[in-house]
């Protein structure tokens, strides 16, 4: 019987790894499509912060989907997603934060 439990655990781990890999691939695909699409649109038509908002939504959306499927969430990508979304929305609404200095201070802390 322990062999059967071991096989079940191994198949669950393999399924989780496959789903994680698919979500990672999907995330990169969405990121590249969004970035390429934004480059195709004339810059005066793209509101400021659009790229950061898109990156944040992709990161957070993938974590929410993975969590709903029983995967462990990645706290680092959640943090990056929240930061990207926050900075993107602030830029969209005209509030300019010094993003790079704030990120350096945050990473140093």
Image: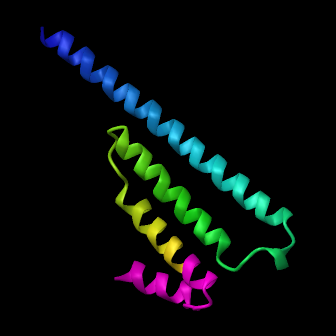
* Residue 1 horizontal side relative to residue 24, left or right: left
Q: Where is residue 82 in the image (x, y as percent from the top left)?
A: 45, 70
Q: Quadrant of the N terminus?
A: top left
Task: Using the rendered view, name the quadrant where residue 91 is placed.
Answer: bottom right
* Residue 97 horizontal side relative to residue 42, left or right: left
Task: Using the rendered view, name the quadrant where residue 51 is placed.
Answer: bottom right
Q: Where is residue 11 in the image (x, y as percent from the top left)?
A: 33, 20
Magenta stretch encompasses residue 83? no
Residue farthest toward the top in the current orientation of the protein: 1
Tell me which residue sits at (13%, 13%) in the image. Answer: 2
Q: What stretch is highlighted in magenta?
A: 88-109
Q: In which quarter of the image is the C terminus?
A: bottom left
Of 48 and 32, nearer the camera is 48
Q: Where is residue 36 in the image (x, y as percent from the top left)?
A: 78, 58
Q: In this view, does 49 lie above or below 2?
A: below
Tell me which residue sits at (46%, 30%) in the image. Answer: 18
* Residue 40 horizontal side relative to residue 100, left or right: right
* Residue 21 horizontal side relative to residue 5, left or right: right
Tell me which residue sits at (33%, 29%) in the image. Answer: 13
């Amino acid at each position: 019987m322990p062999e059967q439990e071991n096989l079940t655990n191994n198949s669950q781990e393999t399924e989780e790894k496959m789903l994680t890999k698919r979500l990672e691939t999907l995330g990169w695909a969405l990121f590249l499509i969004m970035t390429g699409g934004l480059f195709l649109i004339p810059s005066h038509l793209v509101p400021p912060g659009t790229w950061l908002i898109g990156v944040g939504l992709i990161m957070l959306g993938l974590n929410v989907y993975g969590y709903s499927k029983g995967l462990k969430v990645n706290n680092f990508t959640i943090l990056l997603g929240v930061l990207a979304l926050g900075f993107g929305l602030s830029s969209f609404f005209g509030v300019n934060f010094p993003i790079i200095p704030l990120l350096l201070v945050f990473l140093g802390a």
